[in-house]
Image (spheres, rainbow, N blue to C red):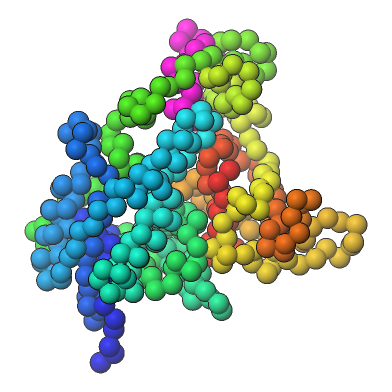
Amino acid sequence: QISRPTVAVAMSGGIDSSAVAVLLKNQGYDVVGVFMRNWDASDEVAENVCQIDKDRIDMREVCNRLQIPYHEVDFVKEYWVDVFTPFLESYKSGILTPNPDVFCNRFIKFFHLKKYISENLGISTLATGHYARIVQGKTSPELWRGVDPIKDQSYFLSLVNGKSLQDVLMPLGNYHKNQVREIVAEPLRGLAVLQKKESMGICFIGKRPMSEFLSRYMPLKRGRFIDMDTGKVVGRHSGCEVLTVGQRARIGGCPEKYYIASKAVQGQPGDVYVVPGVDHPALFTKSVTLSSHLISWIAGHPPPIFLQPQSRQDLKGFLPVNCSYKVRSVQPPAACTVTLFQSDAVDSPEEYDLRVDFFEPQRAVSAGQILVLYLDEQCLGGAVL
């Protein structure tokens, strides 16, 4: 019989992490559950908070059924510093639309949690319920898309450094969601976890409107809706922080449907520029250019395929490479070309800037979004726009 190491499973009280525990125990691992508390909801209204108490109970029931030990760890302070404070600062800018789940993975799960299980439990291997695959590359682990295109969560892992994926298992990357439900159906029969719905949205916000949540932590900037084509003021809004590029602008008494094209970086604070029509050209982007310091390569450096020199010396940069990309987690990967080039500000081969040219113009690309690059099934990394 093959001797397998002890593995800590990041357990949330949901079906996916429970399935990981079932799978690994069946494969002969010594499994230890670890439940993270990342948000202090003691001062929140009961119906709006994360269901952390219910999740904890479900986690305990699963571990008891599977006869595995479990630990509970408090990362409230770390989450506040590394995830929530930058989240608030992004919204305070009035321009950025941040994604806290990406940074929760980067800092909490794959840094603080890995450190905790190593230093406190003596366990080096971490397993999570992400629908993604880890493939051992020549020098470090590679992140690949999950086989279920609907559930694939590689987007949310795109800013995690490959070194942090060492000694990490993601068993669900090889399964479809319906298969995962079948895996837990018998071992967890009768437990409440089987009745749980998919968790959607940002945990600490719950079912509240974003405006209601943010107003607890910052004053929202009221301002004007300005027609980008004419420069005329066509309405007013109650908070530019909660408006997103591409969404319908709710302008009372206006017969024309307006959509948000940009949030002003100049002019009056709170100004939001809108355009008529859902397919207005101002809502589409053909390319983006990213400075080297914004790019997080999973390998820690650009893949060698991006460093093939141009055949003509008068052409700047390296040969373009056909890739695919996402700017939203639910978006199917779309085709693009990626070109690395050296800016005047840097002279290191690992600090090349990057241009992404979309095959088809992309609607509603917004500052603060995460742009993620793929080469076939492999997730290469991402950048905050």
| Residue 298 visible here | yes
Residue 131: x and y in percent read: 38, 61
- Between 27 and 37, the one lying in front of the other is 37
Residue 91: x and y in percent read: 46, 32
- Between 232 and 268, the one lying in front of the other is 268
Chief SS of the magenta region: loop
The quarter of the picture where the C terminus appears is: top right
The quarter of the picture where the N terminus appears is: bottom left
What span is in magenta?
235-256
Residue 198: x and y in percent read: 28, 48
Residue 108: x and y in percent read: 37, 55
- Between 147 and 121, the one lying in front of the other is 121
Which residue is at a point 33% across and 61% down the rendered structure image? 113
Q: Is residue 213 above or below residue 17?
A: above
| Residue 147 visible here | no
**The stretch drawn in magenta includes residue 243:** yes
Q: Given the current orientation, which residue lies at the most extreme top position?
A: 253
**The stretch drawn in magenta includes residue 227:** no
Which residue is at a point 61% across and 41% down the rendered structure image? 362
Q: Is residue 199 above or below residue 219?
A: below
Which residue is at a point 39% across and 65% down the rendered structure image? 173
Which residue is at a point 39% across and 74% down the rendered structure image? 167
